[in-house]
């Protein structure tokens, strides 16, 4: 079997379907670039596993994550974007037009927008996917509001865990920081802030080995194991926030674009990568904010940058 290129060369191909990718699609489509969007097999990105989204502007009563993504997609399609629910296996950025490999088909494009996001690291425990958005979260900024006057776990030992633990004390009555070692890897200033916070209790040498639920639908507790003695203990808890890191979805790029130490794409200016004609937006290039609204704004920038670059280099 041989790869068969498509006959037409797209002005732009967008890889990714979260707020960054779909906003880029809206702007690119309105600019008459007829963007092709590869959404993967989980269209909508991380927001498809988020229930209530209450911090996205324009929805005073909140909106379900999947509904928000579906609305964005329909808006892009209204202006002419074409969406495929397939994974991109690899890309060839060594020459233009760029080649995008999807299964046995090669799609070609004058420009690319990478908006593949970053995947939160999870513990890999039984029923984990089931409880995501039902007491189990990887985003304190997104979901902290739902835990007013509740007791929660934060799992992790780095700066992100410290930051999220401190942030969550604005809402929770008690934050129990679960760490599998007897010392943190976080910076000293971040540790000091947590240890000085009266609403934070640190559980050293502990790891979660099982999620527990009274109703089978939402988190009500967890089983902890002592990493030194092996002793196990069941503890009731209202929610669990995992802060053990994110993995940028860049494996398909095979090292063709510059990244930082964490694997996030490095940008020149706002959205330009080190390869001319290749732009990036959203969580794949943002290790700091990781919000739907910032990703959407970044997607807008990427589409506008791609449009200007195409005008100057491809004469669209």
Image (cartoon, rainbow, N blue to C red):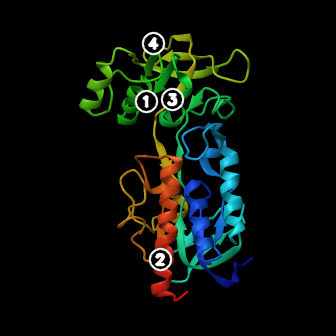
Q: Is disc 3 surrounded by few (<14), some (14 to 19) or many (20+) residues within 10 Å?
A: many
Tags 2 and 4 touching, CB below 8 Å:
no
Q: Which label's residue is closer to the chain start, 1 or 4?
A: 1
Measure how far apart labels 3 and 1 are at the Cα level.
Answer: 16 Å
Per the image, the residue denoted by label 1 is 156
Measure how far apart labels 4 and 3 are at the Cα level.
Answer: 32 Å
Q: Which label's residue is closer to the chain start, 3 or 2?
A: 3
Q: Residue 94 location in percent, x, y?
A: 48, 79
Which of labels 1 and 4 is toward the front?
A: 1
| Secondary structure state at the residue bearing disc 3 | helix
Per the image, the residue denoted by label 4 is 229
Q: Which mark is residue 144?
A: 3
Q: Which label's residue is closer to the chain start, 4 or 3?
A: 3
Q: Is residue 257 left or right of residue 75?
A: left
Which of labels 4 and 3 is toward the front?
A: 3
Per the image, the residue denoted by label 2 is 277
Which of labels 3 and 1 is toward the front?
A: 3
Q: Residue 206 location in percent, x, y?
A: 46, 19
| Secondary structure state at the residue bearing disc 1 | loop
Q: Is residue 251 left or right of residue 257?
A: right
Quadrant in which residue 252 is drawn: bottom right
Tags 3 and 2 touching, CB below 8 Å:
no
Q: Is residue 272 left or right of residue 65?
A: left
Measure how far apart labels 1 and 4 are at the Cα level.
Answer: 20 Å
Q: Residue at x 53, y 48 (%)?
A: 292
Q: Is residue 221 left or right of residue 227?
A: right
Which of labels 2 and 4 is toward the front?
A: 2
| Secondary structure state at the residue bearing disc 2 | loop
Tags 1 and 4 touching, CB below 8 Å:
no
């Amino acid at each position: 079997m041989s790869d068969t290129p498509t006959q037409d060369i797209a002005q732009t191909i967008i890889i990714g379907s979260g707020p960054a990718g779909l906003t880029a699609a809206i702007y690119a489509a309105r600019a008459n670039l007829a963007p092709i969007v590869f959404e993967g097999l989980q269209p909508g990105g991380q927001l498809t596993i988020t229930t209530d989204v209450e911090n996205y502007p324009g929805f005073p009563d909140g909106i379900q994550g999947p509904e928000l993504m579906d609305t964005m997609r329909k808006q892009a399609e209204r202006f002419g974007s074409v969406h495929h629910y397939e994974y991109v296996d690899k890309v060839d950025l060594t020459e233009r037009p760029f080649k995008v490999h999807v299964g046995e088909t090669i799609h070609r494009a004058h420009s690319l927008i990478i908006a593949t996001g970053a995947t939160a690291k999870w513990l890999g425990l039984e029923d984990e996917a089931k409880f995501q958005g039902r007491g189990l979260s990887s985003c304190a900024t997104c979901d902290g509001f739902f835990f007013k006057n509740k007791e929660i776990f934060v799992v992790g030992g780095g700066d992100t865990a410290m930051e999220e633990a401190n942030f969550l004390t604005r809402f929770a009555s008690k934050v129990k920081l679960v760490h599998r070692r007897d010392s943190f890897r976080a910076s000293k200033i971040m540790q000091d802030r947590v240890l000085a916070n009266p609403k934070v209790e640190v559980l050293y040498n502990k790891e979660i080995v099982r999620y527990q639920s009274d109703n089978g639908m939402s988190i009500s507790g967890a089983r902890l194991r002592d990493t030194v003695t092996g002793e196990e203990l069941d503890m009731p808890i209202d929610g669990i926030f995992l802060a053990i890191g994110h993995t940028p979805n860049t494996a398909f790029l095979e090292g063709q674009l510059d990244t930082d130490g964490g694997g996030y794409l490095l940008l020149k200016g706002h959205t330009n990568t080190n390869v001319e004609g290749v732009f990036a937006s959203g969580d794949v290039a943002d290790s700091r904010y990781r919000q739907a609204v910032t990703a959407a704004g970044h997607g807008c920038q990427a589409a506008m940058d791609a449009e200007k670059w195409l005008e100057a280099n491809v004469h669209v």
